[in-house]
Structures are given as structure tokens and as C-alpha cells.
Image: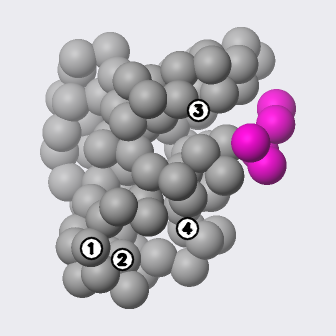
Amino acid sequence: MNNVALKEAIQEILKDVKPGTIFDAHYVIERLFNDKNQTYLGNISKQDINQYDGTIANIIKGMGYDRVGDSISKNILDNYNCCSCWRKK
């Protein structure tokens, strides 16, 4: 898995989020899928979707965003489930 490319894509997505804004992991995942499709799909092959979503959440966590809890929102498979929420500093 190319976590460097994935991290760069996440950083590019989150640069447009205003400071103080709360966002969830599914927002980032949906943007990756829609805007950075080759990066998203190029990294998913060795994991199932739930593990991959967890990997993306861990990358966000490692980028220094403040975790503020959880939300329930639709994942990339159009199913509702719990995911992490973050606040941009």
C-alpha cells in the first residue's frame, strides 16, 4: 500500500476544510473515491472495505487532527455505519 500517496491525497482534500470544521472519515473517503479515484482504488486491493476505511482514519489521526467523537453516516458502499469525527485546527 502506498500510504504516502494516500496521505498526500488526504492532505489535498482537507486543505479546503476551514479551521474549526468537524468532518468525518466518510467525508474524506467519499472525496478520495470521487476526486482521487486512482489513489483510492490503487490502495484497496489487499484489504476489505472496513479495514481500508480504518487505515484512512488512522492516517487522519496521524496527521494531527483532533478526534472529537463518532458519527453515523453512509460509507462508500452506501451503508450506514459508525466512523470517526475530526476537527480541523
Q: Which quarter of the rendered picture does the N terminus lie within?
A: top right
- Judged from the image, the secondary structure of the residue bearing numbered disc 4 is helix
Q: Left or right of 88: which side holds 38?
A: right
Residue type, numbered disc 1 = Lys
- Give the residue displayed 58% in from the left and 32% down from the top: 51
Which one is earlier in the sequence, the residue at label 2 or at label 1? 1
Q: Which residue is mark 4?
A: 61
Q: Nearer the viewer, residue 51 or 88?
A: 88
Q: Left or right of 27: which side holds 67?
A: right
- Give the residue displayed 39% in from the left and 24% down from the top: 34
- Judged from the image, the secondary structure of the residue bearing numbered disc 2 is loop
Q: Left or right of 52: which side holds 16?
A: left
Evaluate if marks 4 and 2 touch, with contact meaning CB atoms under 8 Å apart.
no
Residue 12, placed above or below residue 78: below
- The Cα atoms of the two marked residues, 3 and 4, are separated by 15 Å
Residue type, numbered disc 3 = Gln
Provide residue 24's location: percent of width, then percent of height. Answer: 30, 54
Q: Which residue is mark 3?
A: 51
User: Which mark is drawn over residue 88?
Assistant: 2
- Give the residue displayed 44% in from the left and 64% down from the top: 15
- The Cα atoms of the two marked residues, 1 and 3, are separated by 28 Å
Evaluate if marks 3 and 2 touch, with contact meaning CB atoms under 8 Å apart.
no
Q: Which residue is mark 1?
A: 18
Magenta span contains residue 65: no
Evaluate if marks 2 and 1 touch, with contact meaning CB atoms under 8 Å apart.
yes
Instruction: Give the number of the mark in front: 3 or 2.
Output: 2
Callout 4: 10 Å neighbours few (<14), some, many (20+)? some
Residue 84, placed above or below residue 52: below
Residue type, numbered disc 4 = Lys
Residue 40, placed above or below residue 3: above
* Span highlighted in magenta in the image: 1-5
